[in-house]
Image (cartoon, rainbow, N blue to C red):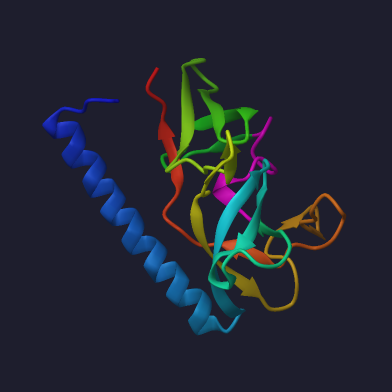
Amino acid sequence: MILLGTRQYRALTSQLAELQATVRAMQQQVLDLGIAAAAAKFEVCEIFDDYNLCRNFDANGEGGLVPVLRPFDLMATGWDGESRPDHDGTLHSYSYSGSQTRTKTVVSSGEEETQNIVPRYVPRQTVTATEYPGSIITAVLLIGGSGHLVGGDPQLDADDAPITWIEVGPRAWSLANE
């Protein structure tokens, strides 16, 4: 259990409220622009660097696994091993050590911080014959194929098929408690 001071708790609560408002606005923009054909809820079953394999939650877990892209900011592709300026122009490099953990380094000073995706993706699991559900995410089905292009090509799953669902939700990178 992590204990937060009142100031930290208020700051995190405020940041989460802002993030949730931004996500709601983005979801509405996607629907208003007509680039999404449908929205659905999915249960995370397996976690990868750029997408998660999920079951359609609305169909009571029936059907096969569906790849659902993460939002671009939460993908490793386009970030891992790259340097990018932050909102204030400070150049940062990114190094991924797992599908939900990365190190962000200030290029000029070498100052590092470890970051985790919050809330964490939790895959569906079976432990000693007990089923534990995975995280529930919301995704939109994109019209015209993949939601992300990598080097001009659509984002593909492990079977080289274009991924047509993309997650829209309140996840972000956060400073890891060490």
- Placement of the N terminus among the 4 image quadrants: top left
| 36 to 160, vertically: above or below | below
> Left or right: 25 with respect to 70?
left
Q: Is residue 93 above or below residue 19?
A: above
Instruction: Give the quarter of the image for residue 160.
Output: bottom right
Part of the protein shown in magenta = 69-82
In the picture, the quarter occupied by the C terminus is: top left
Q: Percent x, y for residue 47?
A: 64, 43
Which residue reaches farthest left?
6
Principal SS element in the magenta part? loop
| Along the viewing direction, whichever of 64 and 77 lies nearer the viewer | 64
Give whichever of 65, 145 is nearer the camera.
Answer: 65
Name which residue lies at 22% across and 48% down: 14
Whether residue 108 is situated above or below residue 24 in the rendered picture = above
The x, y position of residue 132, in whole percent, is 51, 45
Q: How many marks?
A: 0
Rendering quarter of residue 26: bottom left
Which residue sits at x=81%, y=58%? 152
Question: Could you tell whether 44 is left or right of 50 in the image?
Answer: left
Q: Residue furthest front?
A: 129
Q: Residue 99's x, y, as percent?
A: 62, 35
x then y, percent, for residue 54? 64, 56
Q: Is residue 80 left or right of residue 4?
A: right
Q: Residue at x 68, y 42 (%)?
A: 48
Image vertical order of residue 74 relative to residue 145, above or below: above
Q: Is residue 154 magenta?
A: no
Q: Nearer the viewer, residue 59 or 160?
A: 59
- Can residue 75 be seen here? The reply is yes
In the image, residue 72 lies in the stretch drawn in magenta: yes
